[in-house]
Amino acid sequence: MNTYEITNMIIDDDFDSEEYVTAEFSHNQEDYSITFKKADLEIMNSWVFVDGASLPANLSDTLIESIREDIKKRI
């Protein structure tokens, strides 16, 4: 069972050079955003949203891999 829920996913495929996938998700009652390169799903950045601010998120490798696999299924 996933410990997160993807609430929104954006696939930016209109760029000339790189395409990206951004997933917004909830985990442990906090909201996050994570962006991957679409070609190989390499992580580009991740953010946690706290009190109206976005801060760099420190996500476990296990959680990142689980989200990556979920995104593969969706795109």
Image: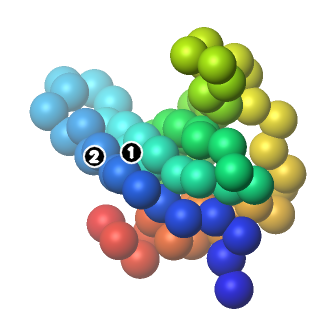
- Residue located 35% across and 51% down the image: 9
Q: Secondary structure at mark 1?
A: strand
| First reached walking from the N terminus: tag 1 or tag 2 | 2
Q: How many marks?
A: 2
Which residue in the rendered view is the most extreme toward the bottom?
A: 1
Residue at 75% from the left image edge and 55% from the top image edge = 28
Above or below 5: residue 29: above
Residue 68 lies in what quarter of the image? bottom right
Q: Which quadrant would the C terminus be assigned to in this image?
A: bottom left
User: Is any atom of residue 3 visible in this view?
Assistant: yes
Mark 1 and mark 2 residues within 8 Å of each other at the beta carbon: yes
59 sits left or right of 6 in the view = right
* Image-based side of 8 in relation to 35, left or right: left
Residue 65: numbered disc = none
> Which residue carries the number 1 mark?
21
Q: Residues within 10 Å of mark 1 (few under 14, many from 20)?
A: many
In the figure, 74 relative to 56: above or below?
below
Place residue 73 in its image quadrant.
Answer: bottom left
Residue 47 in the image, given as x and y percentages of width and height? 63, 29
Real-space Cα separation, disc 1 to disc 2, in angstroms: 5 Å
What type is the residue that disc 2 sits on? Ile
Residue annotated with mark 2: 11
- Image quadrant where one finds the N terminus: bottom right
Q: Is residue 6 left or right of residue 14?
A: right
